[in-house]
Image (cartoon, rainbow, N blue to C red):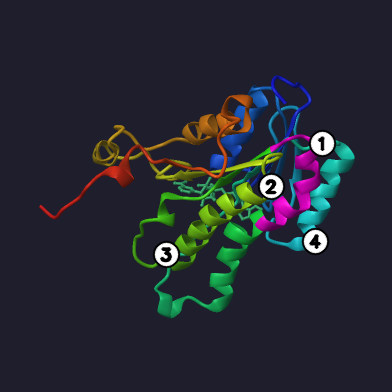
Amino acid sequence: MSGDPNRVALISGGAKGIGAGIAARLARDGWRVVVADREPAGAAPPGGRFVVCDVGAEAAVSALVASVAATERRLDALVCNAGFMIRKPIADLSLAEWSSVLTTNLTSTFLLVRAAEALLRAANGSVVTIASSRARMSEANTESYSASKGGLVALTHALAISLGPNIRVNCISPGWILTKGPEPTAEENAFHPAGRVGRPGDIAGLTAFLLGPDSCFITGAEFVVDGGVTRKMIYPE
Ligand SMILES: NC(=O)c1ccc[n+]([C@@H]2O[C@H](COP(=O)([O-])OP(=O)(O)OC[C@H]3O[C@@H](n4cnc5c(N)ncnc54)[C@H](O)[C@@H]3O)[C@@H](O)[C@H]2O)c1
């Protein structure tokens, strides 16, 4: 798929934030990009196609992948990025809320990869999942999110073993990536060993590498992209 101007990438949750950054980067690199998002007001980058889809819903994912097979007629890359967090004390977290986070953040990757396996195999394609540094460290009241992201890291290596050598599957675990809200303070930037909070482009650059030919010996791996925060030892003053 090196340098092929017809190569196709499907990105879940690409209407905004990190997913939109990945979509824009891949489009600039010459990919044909299909963005799937449950937000109807979303859009794809120039030359791409936008599909409204709840990637936690089995029938919607089947229809999405069928539309890629019919329209783009190939799939070289899948980026499983859709995700969200509920912060609530566990005593107040309903089973429906727990399940909604697990469904979008974890089950959607199962559904997307299962539906797209034949297309990805035909293209010797590559999958990138977007987990989180919260797969291995937590703030209070984030049980469903942390569990979903830990599951996603494990699902990534399971898929890499099952689908190789045709399909490579890797995971990026971002730390704090600024997608909304105010600019970080000087103190927040300085807290990061890299000197700043992350931006969507920091994740998009690694995604482009993991989908491309220069990473062909890498599969089943997790890359923590957090400006060094999870390597920082912290004791009370
Ligand atoms: N921003 C961060 O600091 C950060 C850190 C670690 C991990 N992440 C992960 O990166 C991914 C993107 O995060 P973001 O900050 O860009 O979020 P965001 O809220 O800005 O964007 C997420 C996008 O996913 C879409 N989406 C959510 N559920 C969906 C579903 N069921 N079906 C289809 N689309 C759906 C939303 O509509 C939205 O467009 C998420 O998986 C998130 O957990 C983000």
Above or below for 218 versus 37: above
Marks 2 and 1: which is nearer the front? 2
Q: Position of residue 57 (x, y in %)?
A: 72, 62
* Rendered image: mark on residue 163: 2
* Rendered image: mark on residue 59: 4
What's the magenta region?
110-125
Label 3 crowding class (10 Å Cα cut-off): few <14, some 14-19, many 20+? Answer: some
* Residue found at the very far left of the displayed protein: 237
Instruction: State the CA–CA distance, disc 3 to disc 2.
Output: 31 Å
- Identify the residue at image location x=36%, y=59%: 138
- N-term mark: 2 or 1: 1
- N-term mark: 3 or 2: 3
Residue 74 included in the magenta stretch of the image: no
Q: Amino acid at mark 2?
A: Leu
Q: Are marks 3 and 4 in contact (CB under 8 Å)?
A: no
- N-term mark: 2 or 4: 4
Q: Amino acid at mark 3?
A: Thr
Q: Amino acid at mark 4?
A: Ala
Residue holding disc 3: 142
